[in-house]
Amino acid sequence: MQVIYQELTKRFEETLLESLIKNEKKEEFENIRKNLINQASKEEFGDYQCNICLVLSKIYKRNPREIAIEFVQKLKENKEISNLCEALEIAGPGFINIKLKNNLLIAKIKSNIKCPRAGVPLSNNNSHSQKKVIVDFSSPNIAKEMHVGHLRSTIIGDSIAKIFELRGYTVLRLNHVGDWGTQFGMLITQLKDLYSSDLREIDKITISDLVEFYKASKKRFDNETEFKKRSREEVVKLQSGDKKSIKAWKLLCNQSRKEFDEIYKILNIKIKERGESFYNPFLKSIIEDLTFKKILVEDQGAKCVFLHGMTNKEGNPLPLIIKKKDGGFNYATTDLAALRYRFRKEPHGDNATRIIYVTDHGQSNHFAGVFQVAKRANWIPEDCEVNHVPFGLVQGIDGKKLKTREGDIIKLKDLLSESIKRAKEDLLKRLEKESRFETEEFILNTSKVIGIGAVKYADLSQNRITNYQFSFEKMLSLNGNTAPYLLYTLVRISGINRKNNMNEDAVNSESIAYSHDLEWKLIRKLLKFDEVIVSIEKDLMPNRLCNYLFELCQSFNRFYDQVSILKVEMNTKISRLTLCALTEKTLKLSLELLGIDSLERM
């Protein structure tokens, strides 16, 4: 109902300005107009509420109810508002409850069924297709296996990207892989020591081998002076473009990339890799520009920027180190180079208007510092936006960081395999109980959809800022706010719709009407879908969509259980099947936005 909401807000503003707001108070009105109309706090209050009269009473020193009576009278004289509102009622000290016209809601239901986005409007900016949003997510490190920490970034980032794509933005999904830095000196040195005769032998190494390879090289680096010396020399060779060093580096990256791609395939994630190495040629210019703008200072041999409003325990300004004492660059330098490149116009940059970084909460201070320096250097255009999307830890049911019994971090690949395995076990038990026979193909596909969907939904349904406890038992349950519950509801609706194919003539029927209270509750819940999507675009909280879907499924299941859909006269049947059709469409689209496949049966 986003379009209706915008029209209603516009008409309320016009009426206020024409009848109640005096010229000398217009500036004060500008400060309060953003929350002129809000969602009704309870269904019995209508669709929306307006609390402006309580605010105006403080400005004009008048009784709020008197202002409300005067305002409602003026609103009823507005023809456009009369076409939108069934009722405007004053409640309490001066609240105005707003109930929309039924025929308006029915028209929206019909329209949303035909709309490929289920009623979600494209961005209201006329040039939305020209607005490029970059979502930076996942970001694993070379020679290290993806673990549960990468799971949150990958799932949250993918969902946010899908929502912006639905709204009509051009979205660039970037995987800022850790493929550069001093650690590659010791990795390449170890690689050359083991495969000096033929580097192609590394093709036989798996990601697990690489992890052990990394541990071994780190141990040598810490304990062998000669190895440490050669490793540091190797970094210089790599940065200067030595052919054999570059070849070894590429081999290491390619072996890790195979593992990453396998995980992304399982999760059905589309993402473009652009590692830290891409920005290496731009690091020198970062130093030059910050020096030219007199932002960079030297402190104890390092070049840094002292941050405004960010202090250490002693109350001194925190430094963001741009160039280390030994002349090396670090993550902050690379992130600044990436940010500047992304905002720059093509062909020398990505020409982004908004950049969204999805990383763990522990990097919040780092990005706050990077964003501050970028703003002080004027690298973020005035009409552009940059956001850090932090998330908490994945914990075990004991409330501690999720790890294996041996104390190691759980590998993402193992976690996904375990979820699919458990989903298959649950499915086989259910088939046996129901005496149902299904093909092996059906069992494998259904298990994968439920297993992967359960993991994704369990993550996305949480407020991303907080930690959450990982439990296979809870996430695979058919009851509660889980992916299996949503999928089960979708299967139920799809079955109804398959047996009673709704054609466009039926949807367009003028005889569509509703009288049951549960019908109207479902209608109003369906029509809130676009408002949920638009809100996520603003605050980047995908759990809003999960909460909405759970409530939508609850509304539909109450409707299904208590209202006859098929054994009624034809007009009523068509009307109720119309609600089934839109519920199915909204659920399928929403699951797609969460990166979860749909099922016809389960």
Image: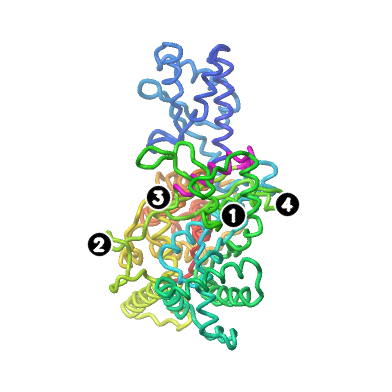
- Circle 3 Cα neighbour tier, 10 Å, few/some/many (<14 / 14–19 / ≥20): some
Label 4 vs label 3, nearer the camera: 4
Q: Check the image and report above or below for 3 versus 33.
A: below
Disc 3 marks a residue whose amino acid type is Ile
Between residues 92 and 160, which one lies in front from this camera angle? 160
Residue designated by label 3: 465
- Circle 1 Cα neighbour tier, 10 Å, few/some/many (<14 / 14–19 / ≥20): some
Which sits earlier in the primary sequence, circle 4 or circle 2?
A: 4
Which sits earlier in the primary sequence, circle 3 or circle 1?
A: 3
Residue designated by label 4: 346
Q: As drawn, is 68 to the left or to the right of 75? A: left
**What x and y, as percent, mark residue 477?**
33, 65
Can residue 249 be seen? yes
Q: Quadrant of residue 490?
A: bottom left
Q: CA distance from mark 1 to mark 2?
A: 54 Å
Between residues 538 and 499, which one lies in front from this camera angle? 538
Q: How many marks?
A: 4
Q: CA distance from mark 3 to mark 1?
A: 45 Å
Label 3 vs label 1, nearer the camera: 3
Disc 1 marks a residue whose amino acid type is Ala
Which residue is farthest right?
347
Q: Quadrant of residue 64?
A: top left
On whether residue 119 falls in the magenta region, the answer is no
Residue that appears at 55% across and 77% down? 255
Instruction: Name the element at disc 1.
Output: helix
Q: As drawn, is 557 to the left or to the right of 345? A: left
- Circle 2 Cα neighbour tier, 10 Å, few/some/many (<14 / 14–19 / ≥20): few
Residue designated by label 2: 398
Which sits earlier in the primary sequence, circle 4 or circle 3?
A: 4
Q: CA distance from mark 3 to mark 2?
A: 19 Å
Which sits earlier in the primary sequence, circle 3 or circle 2?
A: 2
- Magenta stretch: give its range: 365-384
